[in-house]
Image (cartoon, rainbow, N blue to C red):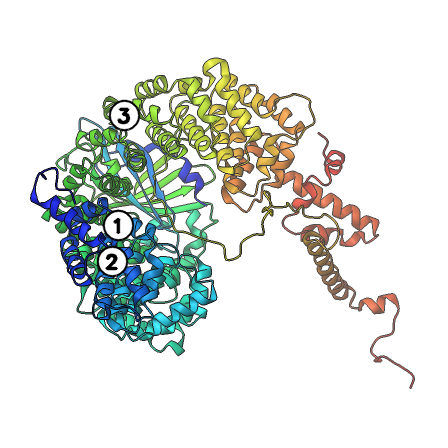
């Protein structure tokens, strides 16, 4: 379900660090390095390019929580962020507004976001990759992040009570000067299952072979197919609603319109 | 007797003398008994002497004494000595068979088996004891013949063994089950015959009976949920409680066997033994058993590993009981048997297979240095275990990103292991290398400079397909986001012709890895796309052929991503992809692309739609011609069916590709819906409801834009 974010690895854009005194934005490159959907975990690096205090680009490693409502909800519950802070930041994303009312109730625990076209995340920087901690920068805060599956853009807001509020992160996926999207991939090796023997209870008689291919079944177009039944029921519902509407407008039942007397029961002469 | 040549020492003469005395017909029974006793005392626990006497042919001689003594039994003249001789010769035979496969083979070849079985029904308890002990020794070896439980008389005999009051005989019954019960059919047969109940009652017996019963219970319930549910049934009393009690037994061996029994139950039927208490208890007891200096301590880590393997909940509990530190402490103590080292590393590997906290903890301890040292250990099993451990630890993206593994202390011994003579070590080393070379920092060149690529390329030519897969896998990961210089170097080492042969490998998993390797090769700077046109485009043609013929979906996925990456290049590249997808222009055979787009595997649909997105990108000048071609092949029509695909990514990309093809699916859809309904309503002369119906014409009707009515689209909208 998150395949577009698993495929797109490189992003670049800016982080707005303006305060009242000065107007400033850093160029930022982000690389997503690993995703573990089962645990709602992702990680990567972030490179800040024109940082005034540093002579080289500053690279940090961050770990992220995907708000999948199973592992993580919209409520952070740590890193000094209160639920009010959470809501205040999340509502800055327009795509969050349909979820707001439910999130206010339970942090979004009951929402199903598996097919939502946006992915909400929190990114927390863990360590500096290429500089020491004395570089004059802080990684105390964390980012509220929203990834759009449709156009592959990332928006985020940095939260750190001690930094200027709502520093905006805006990233687009990079394509290395190509006309199109190119993807590479890696795969980490797992422990192979240790050999465990499995023997069928019943042996096949001699000379008999299992079929090499499973027979394929083509869904029929005619007959009692799912589509036909669905269409039948749709037509039925339309007809039923139609008769109600007719009755509402003409104030006469459909039988009356046809000319059948109503209101006398079955009127069987016994 | 050899008297002519002076013996080099006293000892051989004595041995040969002893055999002579045993062999001689003239030796009186009394002297024979003495000789047998002497022989027994010499060989017990002494491997060298056992081998020496085996060479002198002691086993057939002893067995002939046994057989003649058995034949004479009851009617002979030397009744006084008959039974002691039987007992002694049986004991000698058992001693030869104990822990020595050559001995077992000699004993079996000489036909001792039926003789010993005959002793079980002897009236003298001591004879029975000796026979049962010897048979037990034989059944501990893999060479012992398989006992056929499916024969009724065999089963009856086994039940009589288990029913016996003699603890050695019941122990023999247990050994037979442990040795020969391997299939689920045998397991069921035994449990039907009521063996489980008998074994449970033996749990209350002597030490020998308890251990034998625990071990054979393990063999009967292993991986068989049906038998386990029988074991758990109330009529078997509180059998589970008895076993659970035994994990606190006085004897370490009993504790280990009881733990193993519980682990087998847990691993097979997930409904039992789920409370945290017993889980923690099992882990703590196994940890404690590793302290045992003997065999139990060697086997305990393997039991631990089978308890936690692939079970995240167990790994979490184990981590919480501080297991990583404890295992590492064991390692730091040093000087172990190879078996124990192997077990500890395998247990550590299982611990680090899923949980990041375990990996972090391990890396923070000094044990990591021990791990790299052990990569050069003498025993191949230990080397392989260390590689497996390293492989699982290096699954941590966090530590890969920090470049913790890409240093000489790790890489050099690992690359050395690629030359190892043992295949399992090579495979394990390839696994570790595959993970380590993912390395997100710019240090991949270190690996190349250590000669790693050369060796990987060599192994990618191996005859063994497992080695080939793993070598190509490692190359693929090495190629991931590598810089252009290194890419060039790896490509030269690999050579285009070898890449082609890997793409066309008979093994599908090799094909998959090779295609993924090409995919990574042509990613990155746009110049990299040219690699795929190497050898006059033969590589690309090979990939195209694989796409036409392959049936394994993983191969097709990687192949489509290769084409997608090529299609993200310039106009020439995009045209080359079109030529691969539509090999013969104008032929009416269904293109593979339609098949992929209709695949039930959403990953393949995604890969194919991405390729279409790249091919239909509007800012390219020749995109129009390509769109026309796609439309005439029915691809655009197929894409329209996919705008509501259950897989979100396919849905979004299909819409993106359609949008780029200049198709405005929404307007179409609405237009057709309204016109058809209006037509219908006009036909039915209920014009005044036409409005209501067109509004209520539900949200989506992909049916009307789908292929079953293509004429309708032509009629209403035209081409």
Residue B681 in the image: above or below residue B420: below
Residue B556 in the image: above or below residue B158: above
Residue B288's quadrant in the figure?
bottom left
Residue A114 in the image: above or below residue A58: below
Is residue B559 visible from the viewing direction of this image?
A: yes
Pointer 2: what residue? B94
Residue B280 is situated, as x and y percent measured from the top left of the image, at: 24, 63
Pointer 3: what residue? B452
Pointer 1: what residue? B103
Of B420 and B196, the residue lying toward us = B196
Q: Is residue A223 left or right of residue A140?
A: right
Quarter of the picture containing the C terminus of chain B is top right
Q: Chain of mark 2?
A: B
Residue B68's quadrant in the figure?
bottom left
In percent of the image, x 76 and y 51: which residue is there?
B690
Residue B577 is situated, as x and y percent measured from the top left of the image, at: 54, 23
Of B476 and B329, the residue lying toward us = B329
Q: Chain of mark 3?
A: B
**Same subunit: marks 3 and 1:** yes
The extreme bottom residue here reads: A270
Tell me the mark number nearer the camera, choosing from 3 and 2.
2
């Amino acid at each position: 379900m998150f395949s577009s974010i698993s495929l797109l690895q490189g992003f670049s854009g800016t982080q707005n660090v303006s305060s009242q005194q000065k107007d400033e934005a850093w160029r930022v490159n982000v690389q997503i390095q690993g995703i573990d959907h089962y645990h709602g975990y992702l990680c990567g690096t972030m490179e800040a390019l024109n940082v005034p205090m540093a002579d080289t680009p500053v690279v940090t490693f961050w770990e992220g929580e995907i708000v999948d409502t199973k592992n993580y909800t919209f409520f952070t519950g740590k890193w000094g962020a209160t639920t009010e802070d959470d809501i205040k930041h999340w509502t800055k994303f327009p795509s969050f507004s349909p979820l707001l009312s439910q999130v206010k109730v339970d942090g979004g625990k009951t929402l199903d976001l598996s097919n939502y076209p946006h992915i909400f995340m929190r990114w927390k920087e863990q360590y500096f990759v290429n500089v020491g901690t004395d570089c004059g920068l802080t990684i105390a805060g964390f980012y509220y992040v929203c990834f759009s599956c449709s156009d592959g853009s990332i928006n985020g807001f940095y939260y750190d009570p001690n930094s200027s509020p709502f520093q905006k992160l805006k990233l687009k996926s990079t394509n290395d000067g190509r006309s199109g999207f190119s993807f590479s991939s890696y795969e980490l090796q797992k422990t192979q299952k240790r050999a465990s023997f499995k023997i069928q209870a019943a042996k096949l008689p001699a000379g008999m072979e299992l079929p090499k291919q499973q027979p394929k079944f083509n869904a029929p177009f005619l007959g009692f197919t799912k589509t036909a039944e669905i269409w039948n029921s749709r037509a039925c519902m339309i007809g039923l609603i139609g008769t109600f509407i007719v009755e509402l407008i003409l104030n006469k039942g459909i039988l009356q319109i046809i000319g059948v007397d109503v209101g006398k029961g079955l009127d069987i002469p016994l | 007797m050899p008297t002519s040549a002076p013996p080099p020492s006293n000892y051989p003469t004595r041995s040969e003398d002893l055999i002579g005395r045993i062999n001689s017909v003239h030796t009186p029974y009394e002297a024979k008994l003495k000789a047998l006793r002497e022989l027994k005392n010499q060989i017990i626990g002494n491997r060298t002497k056992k081998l020496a006497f085996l060479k002198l042919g002691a086993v057939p001689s002893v067995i002939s004494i046994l057989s003649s003594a058995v034949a004479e039994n009851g009617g002979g003249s030397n009744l006084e000595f008959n039974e002691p001789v039987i007992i002694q010769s049986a004991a000698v035979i058992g001693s030869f068979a104990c822990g020595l496969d050559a001995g077992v083979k000699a004993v079996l070849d000489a036909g001792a088996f039926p003789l010993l079985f005959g002793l079980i029904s002897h009236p003298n308890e001591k004879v029975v004891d000796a026979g049962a002990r010897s048979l037990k020794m034989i059944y501990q070896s893999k060479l012992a013949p398989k006992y056929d439980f499916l024969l009724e008389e065999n089963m009856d005999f086994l039940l009589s063994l288990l029913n016996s009051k003699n603890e050695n005989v019941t122990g023999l019954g247990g050994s037979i089950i442990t040795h020969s019960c391997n299939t689920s059919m045998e397991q069921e047969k035994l449990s039907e015959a009521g063996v489980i109940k008998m074994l449970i009652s033996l749990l209350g017996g002597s030490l020998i009976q308890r251990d034998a019963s625990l071990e054979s219970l393990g063999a009967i319930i292993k991986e068989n949920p049906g038998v386990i549910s029988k074991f758990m049934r109330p009529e078997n009393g509180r059998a589970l409680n008895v076993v659970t009690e035994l994990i606190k037994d006085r004897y370490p061996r009993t504790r280990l066997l009881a733990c193993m029994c519980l682990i087998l139950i847990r691993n097979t039927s997930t409904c039992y033994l789920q409370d945290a208490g017993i889980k923690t208890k099992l882990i703590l007891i196994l940890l404690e058993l590793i302290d045992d200096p003997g065999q139990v301590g060697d086997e305990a880590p393997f039991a631990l590993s089978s308890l936690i393997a692939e079970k995240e909940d167990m790994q979490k509990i184990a981590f919480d009981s501080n297991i990583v530190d404890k295992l590492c402490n064991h390692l730091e103590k040093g000087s172990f048997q190879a078996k124990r080292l192997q077990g500890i590393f395998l247990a550590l590997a299982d611990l680090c297979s899923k949980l990041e906290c375990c990996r972090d903890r391990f890396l923070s301890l000094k044990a990591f240095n021990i791990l790299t040292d052990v990569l050069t250990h003498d025993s191949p099993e230990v080397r392989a275990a260390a590689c497996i451990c390293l492989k699982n630890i290096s699954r941590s993206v966090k530590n890969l990103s920090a470049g913790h593994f890409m240093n000489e202390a790790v890489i050099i011994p690992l690359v050395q292991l690629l030359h190892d003579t043992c295949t399992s070590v090579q495979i394990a080393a390839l696994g570790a290398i595959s993970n380590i070379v993912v390395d997100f920092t710019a240090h991949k060149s270190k690996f190349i400079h250590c000669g790693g690529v050369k060796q990987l390329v060599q192994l990618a030519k191996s005859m063994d397909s497992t080695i080939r897969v793993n070598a190509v896998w490692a190359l693929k990961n090495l190629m991931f986001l590598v810089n252009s210089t290194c890419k060039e170097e790896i490509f030269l080492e690999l050579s285009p012709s070898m890449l082609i042969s890997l793409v066309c490998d008979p093994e599908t998993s090799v094909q998959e890895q090779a295609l993924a390797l090409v995919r990574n090769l042509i990613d990155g700077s746009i110049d990299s796309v040219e690699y795929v046109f190497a050898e006059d485009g033969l590589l690309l043609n090979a990939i195209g052929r694989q796409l036409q013929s392959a049936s394994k979906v993983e191969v097709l996925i990687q192949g489509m991503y290769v084409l997608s990456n090529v299609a993200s290049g310039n106009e020439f590249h995009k045209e080359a992809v079109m030529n691969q997808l539509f090999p013969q222009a104008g032929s009416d055979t269904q293109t593979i692309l339609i098949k992929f787009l209709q695949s039930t595997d959403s990953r393949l649909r995604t890969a194919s739609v991405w390729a279409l997105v790249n091919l239909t990108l509007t800012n390219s000048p020749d995109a129009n011609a390509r769109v026309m071609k796609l439309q005439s092949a029915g691809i655009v029509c197929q894409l329209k069916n996919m705008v509501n695909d259950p897989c979100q990514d396919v849905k979004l990309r299909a819409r993106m590709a359609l949008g780029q093809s200049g198709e405005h699916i929404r307007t179409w859809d609405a237009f057709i819906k309204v016109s058809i309904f209006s037509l219908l309503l006009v036909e039915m002369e209920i014009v005044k409801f036409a409005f209501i119906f067109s509004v209520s014409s539900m949200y989506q009707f992909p049916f009307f834009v789908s292929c079953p009515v293509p004429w309708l689209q032509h009629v209403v909208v035209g081409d």
